[in-house]
Image: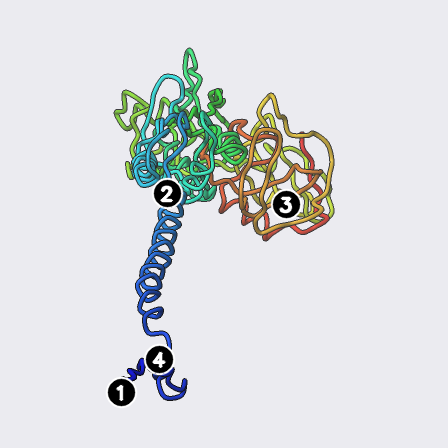
Amino acid sequence: MSKVVQNMVPSRPAASAVRPNNPRPVTHRRWLPWLVVGGIGAVGTAVFAFIGILLIVGIVSNRGIASGVSVAGLSLGGQSLDDARTQLKQWAARPVTLTDGDRSWQLSLADLGVQVDIDNTITALKNAPAKSQLQPRLTIDLIKTQDTLFTLSNQVNIAAVSGNPPQQGRAMDIPVTLSRLQADVTGELSDGILELDMITVDPPETQTSGVDSGARTTHVVEAGQELALIARDYGVDMQDILTLNNISNPDLLYVGQELTIPASGEYEPTQADAPAAPTNSGKSILVSTGEQRIYAYEDGKLVHSHLASTGLPATPTVLGDYKIYVKYLADDMSGPGYFLPQVPYTMYFYQGYGIHGTYWHNSFGRPMSHGCVNLPTPEAKWFFDWASVGTPVRVI
């Protein structure tokens, strides 16, 4: 009997019996490393891109100054903005030389009322193309500037001296200098030198008439006063003051010095000495360009007088009969080549011609103005309070 051997072929199990919870474990294990590597790569790319952006922004925001760029003579091309800022601060702190052509004085920009706008200058440097020549951004306080120039004028001005022969003087023309600074402060100061405008001052003629008590008095020298002016104010000869006070050099006065004045009493013209009043009715003002004096009248009678400064030969005061048409407690004045802020006690009598206070010089009794009638500020206040709009003004 033969034995029949049956081949045992396992049957395929049912799908539901052999399917695991994760049907493709091998495939999943192969993807994971690539996903991790890919994720790291993406993150790394983003990080590097971000760092690159920061570097670019940093370079752009902190980039140096283009080659060949200069400001106020400072060669700043290729430097960093921080280095440029340091040099600009040093430049702003340097002294400025003021000169009248023969002599010189040194002041700081701050003394002159000038400030350097460092931030705006740096911005201009940052945006400047190669080989640009820039100027610093400056601002100026003209009130402070004029105060400084007036103080300096006590050293700068040279008194005119009457005598045989007479000696001409020199005085700083502050309005003209202020006008230049107002028009172009950067251009005027960028090289560190300011040329002062000067005018020639003729010696005054000695006043011989007036009221004189016959006694002596004491005069205390004030800032800006000259011996010739003091002598004229008192109506005495300057040589008499020199002799009485044992003064050999009239230019060596000092503030606070006590002078003995012969024939005391500040010079006041008498009615007989004064020019005729413009009118015999009401108040009127007369300005004598020949005498450099202003007169106040009421009903034709002289009530007050004082030394004045009228226009220089190149800018004479207008002659004729006028009336005060407007009054200002203070007014900015300007004209060809000059500027003056806040001129006190101003009374205009014809176009831009007026009677006003003066803070920029003390040289009354001689032509000094650009056409107006300059008075010491206290005198200008007296006339301002006394006169009214419509008061006649005669200039002879």
Q: Can residue 218 be seen in this view?
A: no
Secondary structure category for the residue under label 4:
loop
Instruction: Give the spatial CA distance, label 3 vs label 1.
Output: 158 Å
**Which one is in front in this view, the residue at disc 2 or the one at disc 3?**
2
Three-letter residue code for mark 1: Met
Three-letter residue code for mark 2: Ile
72 on left or right of 347:
left
Quadrant of residue 147 in the image?
Answer: top left
**Which one is in front in this view, the residue at disc 4 or the one at disc 2?**
4
Instruction: Give the spatial CA distance, label 2 vs label 1.
Output: 102 Å
Residue lying at 57% horizontally and 42% vertically, measured from the top left = 356
Question: Can you say whether 100 is above or below 349 in the image?
Answer: above
Circles 2 and 1, Cβ within 8 Å, touching? The answer is no
Question: Mark 1 or mark 2, which is nearer the start of the sequence?
Answer: 1
Three-letter residue code for mark 3: Met
Residue toward you, 346 or 211? 346
**Which one is in front in this view, the residue at disc 2 or the one at disc 1?**
1
Question: Mark 1 or mark 3, which is nearer the start of the sequence?
Answer: 1
Circles 3 and 4, Cβ within 8 Å, touching? The answer is no
Question: Mark 4 or mark 3, which is nearer the start of the sequence?
Answer: 4
Secondary structure category for the residue under label 1:
loop
